[in-house]
Every structure is written in structure tokens, then in C-alpha cells.
């Protein structure tokens, strides 16, 4: 299939107009007319993931986080982003990012599935028209009431994580949870409004975390990568289902942060 045909199928479920205004999803490098036989999925374009895409002879690389967020006045090998753009072009790999449009239209429900949340609702609405409503994050009821310490273990098991950071008293009982994958501290006000007792997200700084606890919310920081790497396997299955003629490979899961 041509690149533009694949992207059209993707955008039927994850339209670019659902992305946040500050975001930069879509085709960022490449040719819409390019024939695509192999797709490579990763969370980010790094030197390692790009080399893996080259080695698998991918024609199209799709990531969650955009390599390019703001305007670039020059693309040279003196800059690490420039080097990656040049390598994509040299290897004839088109590059597409699906960021907050996927967060809103896919990742929010997917992460709630991992936590087995019931009675789930949107944490922060970003789009509303008539009866249609979409947004970031979800909140709802955990499978059972558990202590914060038990909830941390549950999150680790469900997301297959080596560790999580926990803010709050370990013995605190929680039954209502909120989740926003990636960096979710900006949604703490929405979590307060939801009356969730524990918030699962990533990239929570010290002051945001202790302030949340002071307001009655326990926090489980499962990491940015730890809450979003699930994008890769999910999209692999989605692409295989919708575009069976394309071969799809994913970057192996390698957590960038180690506990030592």
C-alpha cells in the first residue's frame, strides 16, 4: 500500500484534529506516495529505535512521541534531531507520529483496561459536540478495594514494570483510581474533582506529588515510558487487523530508567 493509504486508515480512528493544539502529530518526514511493505513501531525516535527500523528494512516508522515538536531552521548532522531526520531520509523511511490524538482516542481507554477500571469516565474532556465527548485519562473503580501498597503492586503487575514510585501512606485504602499515561501532573485538579483516591501517571515532580497527598490523593508514578510503551503492542495488533498485507515490527521493550 502507499503511505498515504495507511495513514488514512490510521486517521479514521485517530484523527489528527483530536490532538491538542500544542502538539505535532502526523507525517513529519517522508513521501505520502511511497510504497510501504514494512512498518516499524516504537515509542520514540531514538538512535537505537531508528537503527532498529533501518535494520528491519522498514518503509514507515510510527512512534507515539513526535521527533519534531517545534520549527527547525536547519537540518544538519550537528544536531541530534537533524541527524535522525537525515538518517530517515537516507534510508527512505517515512516517519509518522500519533501523539495526543492517540492519547485521547486510544491510550485513555487502553490504560483503563490495564487497570480493569469499571464505571469509567473521562478525566479531562478535550472535545465535546452533541453526545460525543472525548478526552485525556480515565477514572473509575478498581477491581477491589486495596491498600496503596497493594495497588502499587497491582500497577506493577498489570504494566509489567520493574518498579514504581509511591506517594502516600502504604496502608491507605483505595478503591477509586484515576490514570493518565505519560506526564500527568497537569491533570491533578481534574483528579481532585473526580474524587479518585489514587492517581496513576508518570513524571510527577516532588512538590506536585506531596501537594496531591496533602489534598487527599495518593500518587503512583509508574513512569512516562512505563505507562506508554503499551502503545507499541496495541498498534501492532491494530495495524495487523486493519492492514493485513503490511508486515509490522515493534521495538523490544527496554525501560530507559533503572533502579540502582
Image: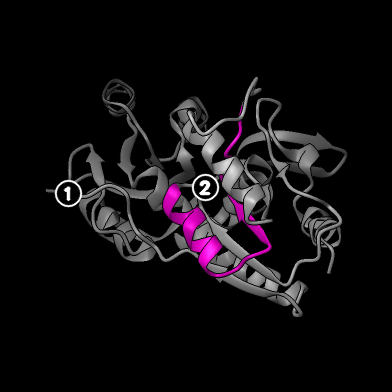
* Residue 78 to residue 129: above or below: above
How crowded pointer 2 is (Cα within 10 Å; few <14, some 14-19, many 20+) is rated as: many
Residue 200 x, y percent position in the rendering: 39, 44
What residue appears at the point 66 percent right and 22 percent down from the top-left corner?
Answer: 71
Give whichever of discs 2 and 1 has the lower sequence position: 2
**What x and y, as percent, mark residue 38?**
67, 70
Q: Secondary structure at mark 2?
A: loop
Residue in the foreground of this view, choosing between 94 and 246 = 94
Q: Are circles 2 and 1 on residues that touch, CB within 8 Å?
A: no
Q: Residue 172 appears in which quarter of the rendering? A: top left
Q: CA distance from mark 2 to mark 1?
A: 24 Å
In front: 83, or 48? 83
Relative placement, left or right, of 99 versus 48 is: right
- Give the side of residue 182 with respect to residue 175, left or right: right
Which region of the structure is painted magenta? 47-69
Q: Give the crowd class for mark 1: few <14, some 14-19, many >=20 residues within 10 Å.
A: few
Report which residue position mark 1 lands on: 259
Residue 131: give x, y in percent of width and height: 84, 44
Q: Residue 171 bears which disc, if any?
A: none
Residue of label 2: 45
**Residue 80's x, y, as percent?**
47, 34
Q: Residue at x 35, y 32 (%)?
A: 204
Q: Within the magenta stretch, is there residue 166?
A: no
Q: Nearer the viewer, mark 2 or mark 1?
A: 2
Tag 1 secondary structure: loop
Looking at this rendering, what residue extends furthest in the bottom direction? 245
Q: Residue at x 51, y 54 (%)?
A: 50
Relative placement, left or right, of 55 versus 144 is right
Q: Quadrant of the N terminus?
A: bottom right
Amino acid at each position: 500500500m502507499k503511505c498515504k493509504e495507511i495513514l488514512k486508515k490510521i486517521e479514521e480512528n485517530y484523527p489528527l484534529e483530536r490532538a491538542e493544539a500544542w502538539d505535532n502529530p502526523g507525517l513529519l518526514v517522508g513521501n505520502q506516495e511511497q510504497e510501504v511493505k514494512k512498518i516499524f513501531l516504537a515509542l520514540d525516535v531514538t538512535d537505537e529505535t531508528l537503527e532498529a527500523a533501518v535494520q528491519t528494512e522498514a518503509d514507515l516508522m510510527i512512534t507515539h512521541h513526535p521527533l519534531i515538536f517545534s520549527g527547525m531552521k536547519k537540518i544538519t548532522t550537528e544536531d541530534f534531531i537533524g541527524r535522525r531526520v537525515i538518517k530517515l531520509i537516507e534510508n527512505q523511511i517515512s516517519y509518522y507520529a500519533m501523539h495526543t490524538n492517540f492519547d485521547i482516542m486510544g491510550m485513555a481507554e487502553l490504560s483503563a483496561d490495564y487497570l480493569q477500571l469499571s464505571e469509567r469516565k473521562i478525566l479531562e474532556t478535550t472535545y465535546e459536540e452533541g453526545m460525543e465527548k472525548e478526552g485525556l485519562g480515565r477514572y473509575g473503580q478498581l477491581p477491589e478495594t486495596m491498600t496503596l501498597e497493594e495497588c502499587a503492586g497491582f500497577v506493577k503487575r498489570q504494566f509489567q514494570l520493574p518498579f514504581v514510585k509511591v506517594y502516600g501512606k502504604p496502608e491507605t485504602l483505595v478503591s477509586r483510581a484515576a490514570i493518565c499515561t505519560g506526564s500527568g501532573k497537569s491533570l491533578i485538579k481534574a483528579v481532585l474533582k473526580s474524587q479518585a483516591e489514587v492517581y496513576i501517571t508518570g513524571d510527577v515532580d516532588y512538590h506536585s506529588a506531596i501537594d496531591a497527598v496533602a489534598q487527599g490523593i495518593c500518587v503512583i508514578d509508574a513512569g512516562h515510558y512505563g505507562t506508554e510503551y503499551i502503545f507499541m503492542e496495541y498498534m501492532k495488533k491494530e495495524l495487523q487487523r486493519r492492514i493485513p498485507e503490511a508486515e509490522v515490527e515493534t521495538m523490544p521493550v527496554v525501560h530507559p530508567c533503572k533502579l540502582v
